[in-house]
Image (tube, grey):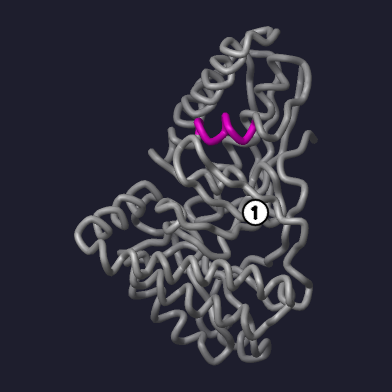
Amino acid sequence: MKVSYTAPGKIILSGEHSVVYTKPALVTAVDLLLVITIEDGNIDNSDPLTDKSMKYCSNVVLQHLKKKKLSYDERNFIYMITSDIPEGRGMGSSAAFCVAAVAALLHFYTGHAHEKDTINSLAYACEKYFHGMPSGVDVSASCFGGLVYYRKEFEFLKYISALNFKIPKTIQDHLILIDSGKPDESTREMVARVGKKYNTDTVQMEQTLIGIEKVTKKMVVSIVKEDLKMFTECIHENQRHLVDFGIVSTSTQELLTKLAEAGTGKVTGAGGHAEGSGLILFFIENKKTFEALTQKLHLTCIPFAQQFEGVCKV
């Protein structure tokens, strides 16, 4: 048997890190895809790190099938991965890997496709292998596609709302992703950094978390109303809160200052403290000025486009 599944990357519009502390996040899947193909054979250890990750995902899937007493055929496999999603840039490349791997392995072992709720749950268990204690929002966006409003109260209680509307063209046409550089820190390290700051300055951090929650809800309203002014205000406010979190490097703050005459932007994802903070979600207000600055500053940009299908069989 040979089976292929694809899963999209994601962009957090609002709610980075605060989603770990029971606050909501607004996320969209983006049209950059990772594809995993699985067929009968034996892993040849050509890439030990990826092999280990695939075997971990396989074990999670097999444990689920055994626990649910579902019919399956456990057999050896080989795999191939292709991806458009930049790694280490806050676009959920590891989440897309987990989602596509779980979907493909479930199909490979049982001979049929499985529900997205099942894929999402197992992919979240797999993502813990990469990030320790992730919120789960990345895998949910990659699994379901489109706009997702996500909130986790407890490990056993999560609210995942796949919104029945999308970012309107009037807003999307102004958006672009700018690469501020790969962070020195991993997502796990950045989550731990914010956690340490929360434990040492709880009162201030709680105020920041409340601020981000308000911004997240305000951003939903701005999208529904197609209010460009409100949307840009949300980006600006969100970035200010992320600086308070300590997840935006000095170089990234300086870059956004240089770009201020062309529009406004915010870090999206776990961020980075020492050098580089991953991708910036930027709202272009003056296209001509932005293009000039892009050339002058030698910026690497990625087009912003939503993806609505989530995980799919190829």
User: Dot 1: few (<14), some (14–19), or many (≥20) neighbours within 10 Å?
Assistant: many
Residue at 62% from the left image edge and 36% from the top image edge: 120
- Of all residues, the one furthest to the left in this rendering is 200
Residue at 68% from the left image edge and 67% from the top image edge: 303
Residue 185 lies, in percent from the top left, at 34, 54
Q: In this view, does 6 lie to the left or right of 242?
A: right
Q: Is the magenta stretch mostly helix, strand or loop?
A: helix
Residue at 36% from the left image edge and 64% from the top image edge: 247
**Of the pair 127 and 259, the residue shown nearer to us:** 127
Looking at the figure, which quarter contains the N terminus?
A: top right
Asked where in the image residue 2 lies, by quadrant, the reply is top right
Residue type marked 1? Val
Q: Is residue 272 left or right of residue 151?
A: left
**299 up-or-down from 100: above or below:** below
**87 up-or-down from 306: above or below:** above
**25 up-or-down from 1: above or below:** below
Span of residues in magenta: 119-126
In the rendered structure, does residue 124 fall within the stretch colored magenta? yes
Callout 1: SS = strand
Q: Is residue 243 left or right of residue 112?
A: left
Residue at 58% from the left image edge and 10% from the top image edge: 66
In the rendered structure, does residue 141 fall within the stretch colored magenta? no
**Of the pair 65 and 176, the residue shown nearer to us:** 65
Residue 9 lies, in percent from the top left, at 62, 50
Looking at the figure, which quarter contains the C terminus?
A: top right
Asked where in the image residue 132 lies, by quadrant, the reply is top left
**103 up-or-down from 306: above or below:** above
Circle 1 is placed at which residue position?
A: 148
